[in-house]
Every structure is written in structure tokens, then in C-alpha cells.
Amino acid sequence: MAKKKKNKLVLERCDLELEANGRDHHTADLCRERLVVRRGQPFWLTLHFEGRNYEASVDSLTFCAVTGPDPSEEAGTKALFRLSDAVEEGAWAAVAVDQQDSTLSLHLTTPANAPIGHYRLSLEASTGYQGSSFMLGQFTLLFNSWCPADAVYLDSDEERREYVLTQQGFIYQGSAKFIKNIPWNFGQFEDGILDICLTLLDVNPKFLKNAGRDCSRRSSPVYVGRVVSAMVNCNDDQGVLLGRWDNNYADGISPMFWIGSVDILRRWKKDGCQRVKYGQCWVFAAVACTVLRCLGIPTRVVTNYNSAHDQNSNLLIEYFRNEFGEIQSDKSEMIWNFHCWVESWMTRPDLQPGYEGWQALDPTPQEKSEGTYCCGPVPVRAIKEGDLSTKYDAPFVFAEVNADVVDWIRQDDGSLRKSINHSLVVGLKISTKSVGRDEREDITHNYKYPEGSPEEREAFKRANHLNKVVDKEETGVAMRIRVGEGMNRGCDFDVFAHITNSTPEEHAGRLLLCARTVSYNGILGPECGTKDLLNLSLEPYSEKSIPLRILYEKYCDCLTESNLIKVRGLLIEPAANSYLLAERDIYLENPEIKIRILGEPKQNRKLVAELSLQNPLTVALSGCAFTVEGAGLIEEQKTVDIPDPVEAGEEVKVRVDLLPLYAGRHKLVVNFDSDRLKAVKGFRNVIVGPS
């Protein structure tokens, strides 16, 4: 008797199981309306058939996953794979997990080295000679630090949570002797950010030149990191941010004003990928951190204090000063008070073993790398070892943390005399946020061996940084700048030149003290305090502290948004024809923003946050506003304007409503801005308890 012919298999619909996949792949915040999964890890699909279910003996199911505008199997951007009984290591696979009535539940597995990006998934179902094609849907594939075979694998769950999933953090500013933490909303899972990050990849020049090759290379976090480093600045492309450092931001937004990456990225996309004005190093780094975390690469923002900008790779920053110690010419090679970049965690199959782990990437446009304004990724380990042949851009990053500084004094006859300056050491207090805690972690040891150690000398020799190996000149007379208490914005305060004579001879000379406002990148503003002692005598084995009073009325109109004042002391000893220089950058503390929660934070309960700040100045403020970012905010309340004026000493209070949250926490990042008090930051973490 003839066998009855089977009807062809007809797919009614495909369920992408958003909730289960979002939970399993740590993408729940992204999976509300679309499927977002991480590579190298199975995800669920449920196929609903009409009429009859799939039968292994008569039906054949072949899946096709493609990414990019020109997919090909050879480039790894197209995959054809049949429903099978087992997963083949490193290959696309579909395995049946459960079958009931007219439904078939599947596990789809992607290779741990598949290109990330937006995929289209289709099905070819054939029964005998009959065949039908069905579009199953679309999904976004991300890097997977939970998968041991992925190049971005991290074996610590706490670190994965911090460097991939955490949406708020701190960026460190201030000075090496007064480190200031600035709250930042990275917001990598907020609405629309993932699409913006994928758009950023799709407008990069490498994609526009050869889309197929670019999409294929998105399998590598090294490649993607380099693209992101270039695209966060707009110097060569349709990048996100325009950098500006001259304190003229009237046609845009001051870099100090931003409190998160979300607003920046949304503005860029809304304006048709037009550059957003303006960014400086921590803004570039923070936006890069958002993009890289969103794509699944573990990333953190780091801050290096006394960071050198070395243009010619000679590991030397030279300052030429007149006989009063004033720098004579503007120059692009200088020491930045601090500089921020990011580190991303990945393997480096393109380099020798031992260079996996944290890689430095710097999106701030400073010098070109292979013809483009980008920097890295370079292994942090290579910087520590002085291995400057390592790609990418090891000499530049090595100089940022190790360059030597030489100060030349041009004397009356035109000759140059080297001054002794032990107050400025490049590469101090390299800082990042601690894992799982709102505290600073010092990671200087990742970049440098202990000062004076044999390993440090070996690294300098390997880097041909021979001037660092030479012993420093000592004279027996030392000077440093010391500070007192109460260095708050709006106050008068004292600083001191503390001079020590540790020799048996008396020394006589002239002391010049000068205070000038300064931007964080080393550009000096007007004077705000001076003292000239023509006849200073130092008895044998003695110490002296000479005060310099700095008045608010002198610095109030010229202080930049960096809140920094540079104090310089120059001790001239004519008898010995010697110059002793000491400098210190002083950070003026802003008033505190107090954030109070009214009512008990419970699930599903509306909350009110009260923000307050006291005007610390002796003058009234105008044009005041609070700006707030974080979870549970009503859009209309993200900026709250305050009526003019806010008198000297007056406290201002505003309230913002917080929408009910089901669980977790409200993290509020707040900025206060006015005509005379710019970019005062505040942060509050509110844990929501069960209702």
C-alpha cells in the first residue's frame, strides 16, 4: 500500500522568547521589544506550526543567519545550519529541546567568535520535494564576557557586573593631591542607546569603504575597540563629539555640564549623526565606555594625574621660562593636570602571549594613529614593561605615564639654565572606580613598577628612556608648596612655600611666588596672587614657610570650570646661579548638593527627591538650574530652573518626582549650573525595598 504523502510544513509564527533570553543573556533591559543575545551561548526559539508539527523523519529545517548589507559565508557574516542533535564547537547550531502539539522549542547557538551586530534569521523548511521559506525575526548579537571561549571573557561575576552591566559610576578629576569623584550616568541600557551604538559602527569610514569586510571584522573586540576610539571624536568622520578646551562654549554645551552619556548619544543620532558640542577627555572616555559596555566589552574609565602629552615620542616635555619662572611660549606639548581614557578587557591573539587583559583605549583626539585620531588598544602590561613596539600606540601611552619634565630658565644674557623641579612627577594616582563599591581603586601598579626598583629601571632601558635612569641632581635646598584648610570656592585662603635648607651653609636668594588660574589641560589664566621676596635668607639646617594669600575677589572672574589654581614658587640663588622650582595645582571645593528622599523607598511606590544647595559666594547667582539623570525620572523634570536671584548664603531647594520602580535602585546624578557657579555635581543611590 502506498505511503500517504505528507503536507508541507507551514510556520504560523516564531516566538523569540524575549523574557527568558533576556534573563539568561543579561540583556533583560534591552529585550523588552527585541531579541538581544550574547555570542557563544544558546538562546531559545519556539516555532508554532499550522496543521501539523515537525517530524524528524520527513522534514528538514535549515536556518540562515545574516548580518550586514553584503553577507557571505566566507566572511563569517552569513551562516547556514540545519537542525541537528548536537552542538558543534565553534559553529552555528540549532538543537530541538522540546516538542508539544504544534510547537517546537529550539536552542540556537552562535559561535563565540561570530561578528557582533544586527542579524536577520530565516528558516527553510522542506518536506520531500516541497519547500517553504519563513522569516523568523531579527536579533542583535553582542560580545559575551560570560562565555569562556569569547575573547572578552571575564571569570569574575562581580567584575562582569561592574564592567558590563553597571550603568552609573564615577570619573576622577581634581588634582593628584585632591582627587575629586564626579558621578556619571553611562546608561548603556537606556532606550535607544543600543541602536545608536550600532549606528556608530555603521557610519565609521571603514564600513563606508568596505561594508562586508568591516562587518566581518566585528568579530574582534580589538577591531571594534579601535573603531569606537576613532568614532567617539569627530575629527576624521561623523563621530560623536567635538573637543574644545578654550572655555568658549556659548554655541554648544560646556564639557563640564554633562552628567551622562545618554543625552550626548541621543543628540548625535537625532541630529543626523552631526557632532555634539563639546567634549573634553573625561566626556570622550565616558561615551566610549558607554558604547563598549553596551556592545558587551568589559570597560572602565581611568584617570591619570600629571599626564604628559608627548608629540614627538622623545619621552621628554620641556618648558622654557623667563627669569621669573613664567612659561614663555604656548606649546602643545605639556602636562595635563589629569587625563582620562578607558581600559577594555580582551585577549590579544595578534600579540605575543601575556598581553591579554586590560587594554588602554583613548578616544580623545590628540595624535593620529595610522592616519586617524584614535589611540589603542594597547596592553597595559606592555606599558609597564616598556615594550614600545607593541601595537597600538604604545609610545604615546607610555609617555603619558612616564615622560620626564625639564624646566629651562632663559637668563638675561639669553643662555639657558636648567632649574631643579622635584614637585612634578608624571603619571600619579592612576584611578578607577572600585568593583561593586563607590570608592576609588588605585591601579598605578598596573602601569608602573615601584619607583627606583630594578624592574622599573629595566622597563626604562627597554623603552630607551635613558634620561629617567640618570640620578637626580640634589642641592641640599628643597622647596614644596603646602596648603592650608578651607580651600572652598568663594573663600580667601593661604598657600605656603615651604623651604628646607639641609646644608651647614647659609643660603641667600630671591623668592617669587605666583598663583594663576589654570585649566585641567595646563593652559594658564590670569594671576590671582603674587609675592616677591628680594632678600630671603636660609640659616643652616633650617625650615621656613612663606605664606601667599589668595583672595576670592582676585580669582572669582578668571577661575575656569576646572576649579584649579596653579601655585608656582621660584627660588633664585645668584651666588650659585641656581634656580629651584616648585609647583602645585590646587582644587577649590564646590558646595555640596544635598539629595534627600522624602518617604520610604518601596517597590511600586512613587517617591519625591529634594535637591538643595547653598550659595557659598559673596554675590548673588542668576540663571540657576538643576539637571538630573537616572532611573525613574519624568522627562519634564530632568531640568528644573530656579528663579533669580539666589542671594549670597541662600539655600535653594527643588523637588523632583521619581516614578515607581518594581525593584532595584534609583541612582540620581545631579548637576547644578549658574552664571558664577558652574558644574557642581551630586550623586545619590537609593535602594528600593519590598513593598
Image (cartoon, grey):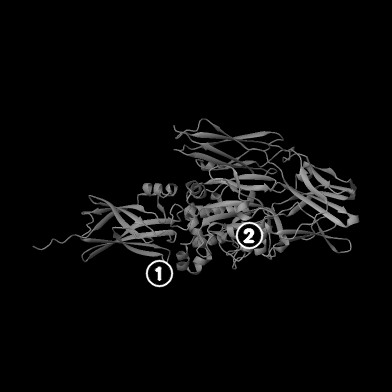
Toward the left, the furthest residue is: 1
Image coordinates for residue 291, horizontal then vertical, percent: 52, 54
Q: Which amino acid does label 1 sit on?
A: Glu
Give the crowd class for mark 2: few <14, some 14-19, many >=20 residues within 10 Å: many
Q: Which residue appears farthest toward the front when viewing the image?
A: 454
Q: Which of marks 2 and 1 is nearer the N terminus?
A: 1
Q: Locate residue 516, reporting x and y percent.
A: 77, 49
| Residue 407 relative to residue 74: left or right | right
Residue that carries the numbered disc 2 in the rendered image? 397
Occupied quadrant, residue 421: bottom right
Q: Nearer the viewer, residue 443 or 38?
A: 443
Crowd tier of the residue under label 1, counting other residues whose Cα lies within 10 Å: few below 14, some 14–19, many 20 or above: few
In the drawing, does residue 639 fall left or right of residue 108? right
Q: Residue 328 carries which label?
A: none
Residue 351, above or below 257: below
Residue 278 visible (yes or no):
no
The one nearer the camera, 122 or 2, is: 2
Q: Give the quarter of the image for residue 10.
A: bottom left
Q: Is mark 2 on a helix, strand or loop?
A: helix
**Residue 408 place in picture, x, y as percent:** 80, 60
- Look at the image and tell me whether residue 242 can be seen: yes
Looking at the rendering, in which quadrant would you find the N terminus?
Answer: bottom left
Q: How many labels does the image show?
A: 2
Amino acid type assigned to the residue bearing label 2 in the image: Val
Residue on which the image places disc 1:
74
